[in-house]
Image (cartoon, helix red, strand yellow):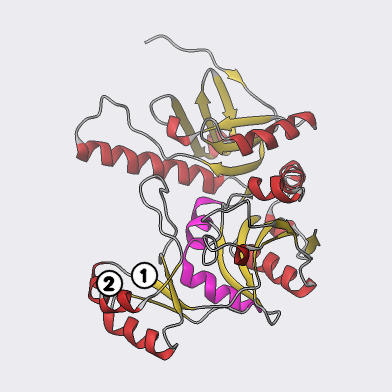
């Protein structure tokens, strides 16, 4: 086998982990390049078929080093100052591996190696490292942590016990909603909106035994809020979902003709709590969904560790992409940052 020549791609760079044709990422990448930043884009789905990971540890190799060989370049991971986890794919075995057991083994080994290499990199991670992102995806943990930082949360129940659902429904006078108990992984194959629980649903409660769901006491809405935390900044946008029958219970049933999106001025203590919530999960970025009630209370719903933000920027003019650039260029790890929150409108 002949040896291949590789070019060393960068001296110091920002590594962006995402798939091809990621339009919001391209906007930030263009801004970063205009600032003179060195940027390398890599999708872990290229590994191991089209890319090679190499790592070594020991006294004769200066302790530890790791590299990615891809597309004729060498990405020296010791030189990476920041990693942006945007929309990365998981490693994909070569098509020549057809045995399902072997294919599963290769996937697991490759994912284990990439996670191991990422964990070794002492740089800024946006949103966070894979293990931190996994932890931040747990809804019950989100609700607990939100309470710990002083945010109000809805009374919530997760169960696959039909009797518990019936009791919860009766306790709250039938005024409850249901949603998935975890984050939806693939919106192309399955999508579940937030819905009111009807008497018909309760009568069919026996089907709950097949899979759990999250139930919450219904929170009346004046406005819904999307709060994008970038470092120590909180960009709040209000979504007037109550002006649309379609989007009334879940703004993700988009109705742009009737639902106004505009910047929202958060109280300083709510902004600070949002920043602390994201930071307590070890993240430098997060998209938070909240409700502003008719009587002026702010109620936390959930945290999306890698939530979408570009549509909010387009509709409201909030400079979220510029803040992402500032954060990535700084290369300052979360633990070295000041905790003071800045509310930006």
- 216 relative position to 238: left or right: left
Q: Which quadrant would residue 49 be assigned to in this image?
A: top left
Depth check: give the residue in front, 158 or 104.
158
- 183 relative position to 39: left or right: left
- 58 relative position to 10: left or right: left
Residue occupied by mark 1: 213
Q: Is residue 12 above or below residue 164?
A: above
Which comes before the other along the chain, label 1 or label 2? Answer: 2
> For the N terminus, which image quadrant?
top left
Span shown in magenta: 129-151
State the predominant SS element of the stretch in magenta: helix
- 153 relative position to 294: left or right: left
State yes or no: discs 1 and 2 in contact (Cβ < 8 Å): yes
**Residue found at x 49% / y 61%:** 137
Depth check: give the residue in front, 163 or 143.
163
Give the crowd class for mark 1: few <14, some 14-19, many >=20 residues within 10 Å: some
Residue occupied by mark 2: 208
Report x, y in % for residue 122.
63, 47
């Amino acid at each position: 086998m002949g040896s291949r020549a590789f070019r060393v791609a960068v001296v110091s760079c920002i590594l962006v982990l995402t798939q091809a044709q990621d339009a919001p990422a391209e906007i930030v990448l263009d801004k970063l390049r205009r600032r003179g930043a060195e940027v390398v884009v890599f999708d872990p789905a290229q590994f191991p078929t089209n890319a090679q990971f190499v790592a070594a540890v020991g006294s004769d190799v200066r302790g530890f080093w790791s590299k990615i060989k891809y597309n004729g370049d060498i990405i020296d991971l010791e030189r990476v100052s920041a990693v942006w986890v945007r929309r990365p794919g998981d490693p994909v075995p070569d098509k020549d591996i057809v045995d399902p057991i072997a294919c599963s083994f290769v996937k697991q080994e490759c994912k284990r190696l990439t996670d191991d290499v990422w964990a070794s990199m002492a740089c800024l991670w946006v949103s966070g490292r894979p293990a931190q992102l996994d932890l931040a995806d747990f809804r019950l943990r989100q609700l607990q942590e939100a309470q710990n930082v002083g945010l109000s949360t809805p009374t919530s129940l997760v169960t696959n016990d039909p009797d518990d659902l019936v009791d919860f429904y009766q306790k709250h006078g039938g005024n409850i909603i249901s949603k998935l108990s975890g984050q939806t992984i693939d919106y192309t194959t399955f999508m579940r909106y937030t819905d009111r629980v009807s008497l018909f649903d309760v009568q069919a409660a026996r089907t709950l035994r097949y899979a759990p769901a999250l139930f919450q006491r219904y929170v009346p809405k004046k406005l819904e809020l999307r709060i994008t935390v970038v470092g120590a900044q909180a960009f709040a946008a209000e979504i007037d979902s109550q002006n649309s029958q379609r989007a009334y219970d879940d703004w993700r049933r988009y109705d742009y003709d009737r639902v106004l999106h505009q910047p929202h001025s958060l109280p300083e203590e709510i902004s600070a709590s949002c920043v602390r919530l994201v930071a307590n999960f070890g993240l430098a970025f997060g998209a938070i969904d909240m409700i502003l009630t008719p009587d002026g209370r702010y109620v936390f719903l959930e945290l999306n560790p890698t939530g979408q933000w570009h549509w909010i920027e387009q509709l409201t003019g909030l400079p979220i992409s510029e803040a992402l650039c500032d954060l990535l260029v700084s290369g300052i790890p979360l633990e070295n940052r000041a905790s003071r929150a800045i509310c930006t409108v």
